[in-house]
Amino acid sequence: MRYLTREISGILRGISFSFLFVFEESSRATTSERISIITAQIRTTPEMPGLDGMASASYPPIESCPSYDPEAIQLPPHLLLDAFHGLNVCAPMVRYSKLAFRTLVSRYETHITMTPMILAKEFSRTEAARNSEFSTNQYERGTYELLPGVAEGSESASRRLSEKDVSSSELPSELTNGEAHREAQAERRRIAKQKVRVRGALVAQFASSEPEPFADASELVGRFVDGVDLNCGCPQPWAYEELLGSYLLRQPETVRDMVRAVKARMGSDFCVSVKIRIDPDLRLTDALVRNALHAGASVLQVHGRTRWQSSSEPVDLDGIKFAVDAANSCGFRTSWGSKGGAAARFADGGSGGLVPCVANGDVWTLDDAILYRKTTGCKGAMSARGLLANPALFSGYEQTPPEAVGFFHRVATTWGLHTGLIQRHLAYMLEGQFQSRAEAIHFNSLSGGAAMTDYLAEQGLLWSADKHADPLASRFGFGTERRGLKKSEGEGVGPQRCWSLSESLAGVGL
Ligand SMILES: Cc1cc2nc3c(=O)[nH]c(=O)nc-3n(C[C@H](O)[C@H](O)[C@H](O)COP(=O)(O)O)c2cc1C
């Protein structure tokens, strides 16, 4: 039920702005008082329909867009990373990693997606921030067939793990006939049988300098995501001055307290990750990692640059490896933090492995992702600008496939995203495909949604329900037919629209 309740920007749904500000909570109230004030006000709001609310004509579902795969197992990010091979992550990106874009990349082997950074204090204090900063719905997570956990780079695994061989329908030239051909086919069948159908995970990223707002924000968003992340890397001067983002890289005790606060509020199983940059003084990286992990951080995400380095500078894979080694030396994950020594592995009934790490910085191709996992010991590879340019990169595409352009345009215009932002996204996706600089300039100068739609239609890039299906629907055969529902009954699971956080809370009786 938790996963059926989702949100979209309150402003886009026409909720009056004055109404949003009525609910700014008193900063003098205690945490639990504030949360009950918020939820009580939501419950009494006449504009907010319950979970059984009717589909609004302005928020129709995307054709064949699967909302929920009952056969897929659902795991939080740290267990996904623990249990499966070759995990890919969409980085948090202010303005960009919003619902429509996350939905798009989740169709192309991006298993974990992250929201843009959200200011925890604002999010926990004001309805306006909650409704504009977080949106989700029942369609956004992808479904994948993943190979259970084998470490990339380990010898015994290497035969199973040539991802391209596993997914490719073409056989290597030396295996085109005879016994070798049959052996290769048998191997593929063996691998296919071992794969498990898994649902993707969504993580909300927060910026905070204090434990309480981070815990409040996590509690509010907790039932709609699979984990939260603490931003310890934003290098922007305004963030540093507010003691946020990269300021925390040298404040290990503050990070420790924030991780502890969320664990205490949300429970030990709740996934709390930290996203860091490396420090030129690696001893400080070591201190940060140890504090975060001993406090119970579930995943470590490492951007291999320092806070002073621009994104044009090369990524330090050795620096990422150093952070991974620091994480591994913290020992096994227990309910309340990593503890050294093999005995700790069984302290909570044996559930905890080493805290999994994710490598980030200059992942532009699937080969980069494979190389990063192999050389750094990370379980996951994260991309930001690479995915903006080619949202299908983790599926092995060299550039954005045309159907991804159409799918994004369809989803973003249907569910609501600012037109200028849709255009920015499309410009990134099409950048390598414009025939000339003049065409790029022409595209960027289009004004308004209609001009953009015309352009896509002329290029044959517009989504067509007759020609296209959601990539997931095609792969797994989801859709109304599979569930034996009539077309008019749509997905049949949950409301056919997006939900604001407040609507979602109201829907689950809070
Ligand atoms: C447009 C944009 C917005 C970003 N916003 C965030 C953010 O909200 N939170 C965060 O931790 N990092 C943010 N980053 C940094 C990325 O998550 C990532 O760490 C960085 O871009 C390096 O990855 P890349 O080389 O794949 O781009 C942003 C990066 C870009 C390009």
Image (spheres, grey):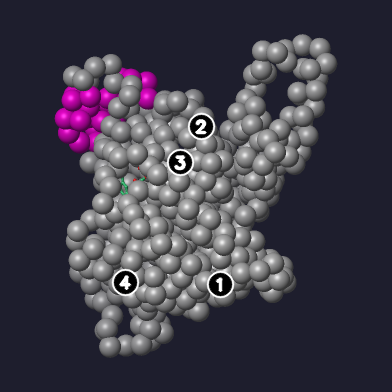
Instruction: State the SS at label 4.
Output: loop
Q: Which residue is mark 2?
A: 367
Q: CA distance from mark 2 to mark 3?
A: 17 Å
Q: Which residue is mark 3?
A: 105
Instruction: State the SS at label 1.
Output: strand
Picture quadrant where residue 385 is located: top left
Picture quadrant where residue 36 is located: bottom left
| Mark 4 nearby-residue class (10 Å; few <14, some 14–19, many ≥20) | many
**Disc 4 residue type?**
Ser
Circle nearer the N terminus (4, 3): 3
Instruction: State the SS at label 3.
Output: helix
**Disc 2 residue type?**
Asp
Q: Which residue is mark 1?
A: 337
Where is residue 438 shown, x and y percent of the image? 18, 19
Q: Would you say 65 lies left or right of 191 here? A: left
**Disc 3 residue type?**
Val
Main SS type for the magenta part? helix
Q: Would you say 194 lies left or right of 378 here? A: right
Residue at the spot 43% in from the left edge and 38% down from the top edge: 363
Is residue 452 in the magenta section? Answer: yes
Residue at the spot 37% in from the left edge and 79% down from the top edge: 212
Q: CA distance from mark 4 to mark 1?
A: 21 Å
Is residue 65 in the magenta section? Answer: no
The answer to whether residue 7 is seen in the rendering is no
Residue 209 is tagged as 4
